[in-house]
């Protein structure tokens, strides 16, 4: 598998941009928490022109698909907590959205847990609905919500002429507002969000050669940052966004380098004849984990950046790869292979305890963490196609995000955007 991954980096960008106003991903909850919190989300009455975006429906879907809530409509008899609100048109293209989160068990003065008012243009109605979902989620669970975050992924469209179009695309966390950043008849891979959420680094192919670009999400402007002979792959941002860890072979074995994006200075971290790839920074920026076959099979190793000391950290299974830290720095999420089956697992760095989160046996791509540390997004194989899956880092929740137009793979979850 390691050789297969390295070979993929060497595959070969004709520009072809498409657009979509709808969700290319169809979020499906496949397993939620048994004791999900009951909550009623009442329809929001609209005063003025009826917008196409249904704010209450978006909130309901967000909470339901989190797996942590059992959502009812206007039937408050089944729940003690409810969401009420309204949408008021206040201009040609502006709407005022107001809502309250109410606890019916408390007296009138204490029953309102949350109340907010927002005035936004029509184009931001979905965004404000996701923001409301975040507020409700945090109020009830104590955890920051991720409904306002975004996803990046690669769409594969298999054309009648036998060609495959590869599209680097971003969308809302629920799959809506899909926006293409780059399209090519050659592979695009390894998207990685900058810590500020404004740029994405990725591997692309120009003139039949791998290259690493950084692209501005808002403007589409892109910058070539590495195109040395051999492999240019697996970009990973430092926590402060000033550096990029990457994999270069320079026509020999792949090794880990760090590029200073301010000065252009390149520093080599590993220097041997093993395959060293897939770097990922710790949240404090003091260490990097990476995949290496130095023990015979791919495993995860950690390098302390102060003294370059390297230690092995994974031992469960014959294959561990694509590691990334949880936001608190206490665990790693990894792609694990054992007995021929690929699943997503977590490793507690303090206790050494390893836990398998998924059980399909075909979860074989790019695990990426939600910024609140509660969910992991990954590529999987379902009904003969590449799709995305989500699982809670405690194993309690699973979702699936099949693509409506093509296949989808190689996901990356954005940081918090507000």
Image (cartoon, grey):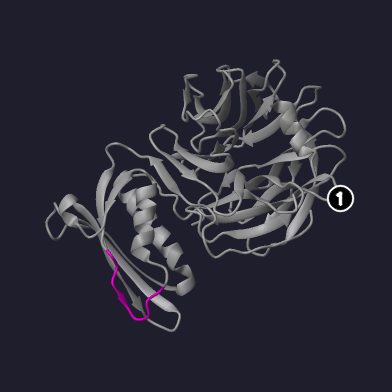
| Image coords of residue 347 (percent x, y) | 51, 25
Magenta span contains residue 50: yes
In the image, taking residue 67 as reference, residue 226 lies left or right, namely right
Is residue 417 positioned above or below 390 on the image?
A: below
Q: How many numbered discs sit on the rendered protein? A: 1
Quadrant, the N terminus: top right
Looking at the image, which is closer to me, 320 or 109?
A: 320
- What residue sits right under mark 1 in the picture? 207
Q: Residue furthest bottom?
A: 92
In the image, taking residue 366 as reference, residue 144 lies left or right, namely left
Residue plotted at (28% across, 72% down): 45
Q: Secondary structure at mark 1?
A: loop
* Residue neighbourhood size for the residue with mark 1, other residues' Cα within 10 Å, grouped as few (<14), some (14–19), many (≥20): few
Residue 132 visible? The answer is: no
Q: Quadrant of residue 267?
A: top right
| Image coords of residue 269 (percent x, y) | 75, 30
Residue 325 visible? The answer is: yes
- In this picture, which residue range is highlighted in magenta? 43-51
């Amino acid at each position: 598998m390691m050789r297969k991954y390295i070979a993929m980096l060497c595959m070969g960008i004709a520009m072809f941009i498409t657009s979509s106003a709808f969700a290319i991903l169809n979020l499906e909850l496949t397993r939620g928490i048994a004791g999900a919190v009951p909550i009623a989300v009442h329809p929001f009455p609209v005063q003025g022109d009826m917008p196409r975006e249904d704010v209450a429906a978006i909130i309901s879907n967000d909470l339901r698909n989190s797996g942590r809530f059992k959502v009812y409509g206007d039937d408050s008899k089944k729940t003690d907590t409810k969401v009420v609100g309204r949408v008021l048109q206040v201009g040609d293209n502006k709407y005022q959205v107001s809502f309250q989160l109410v606890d019916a068990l408390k007296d009138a003065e204490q029953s309102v847990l949350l109340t907010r008012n927002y005035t936004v243009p029509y184009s931001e109605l979905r965004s404000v609905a996701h923001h409301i979902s975040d507020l409700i989620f945090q109020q009830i669970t104590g955890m920051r919500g991720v409904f306002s975050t975004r996803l990046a992924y690669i769409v594969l469209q298999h054309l009648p002429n036998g060609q495959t179009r590869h599209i680097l695309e971003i969308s809302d966390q629920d799959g809506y507002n899909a926006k293409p950043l780059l399209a090519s008849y050659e592979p695009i891979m390894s998207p990685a969000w900058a810590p500020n959420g404004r740029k994405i680094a990725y591997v692309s192919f120009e003139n039949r050669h791998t290259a690493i670009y950084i692209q501005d999400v808002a403007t589409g402007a892109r910058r070539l940052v590495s195109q040395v002979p051999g492999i240019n792959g697996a970009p990973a941002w430092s926590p402060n966004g000033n550096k990029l860890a990457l994999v270069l072979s320079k026509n020999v074995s792949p090794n880990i380098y760090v590029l200073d994006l301010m000065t252009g200075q390149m520093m080599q971290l590993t220097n041997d004849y093993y395959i060293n790839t897939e770097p990922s920074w710790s949240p404090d920026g003091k260490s990097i984990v990476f995949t290496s076959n130095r023990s015979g099979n791919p495993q995860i190793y950690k390098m302390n950046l102060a003294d370059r000391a390297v230690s092995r950290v994974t031992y469960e299974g014959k294959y561990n790869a694509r590691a990334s830290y949880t936001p608190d720095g206490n665990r790693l999420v990894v792609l694990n292979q054992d007995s021929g089956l690929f699943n997503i697992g977590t490793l507690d760095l303090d206790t050494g305890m390893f836990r398998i989160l998924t059980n399909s046996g075909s979860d074989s791509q790019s695990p990426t963490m939600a910024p609140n540390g509660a969910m992991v997004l990954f590529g999987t194989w379902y009904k003969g196609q590449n799709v995305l899956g989500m699982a809670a880092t405690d194993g309690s929740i699973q979702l699936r995000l099949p693509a409506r137009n093509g296949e989808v793979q190689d996901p990356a979850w954005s940081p918090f955007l507000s």
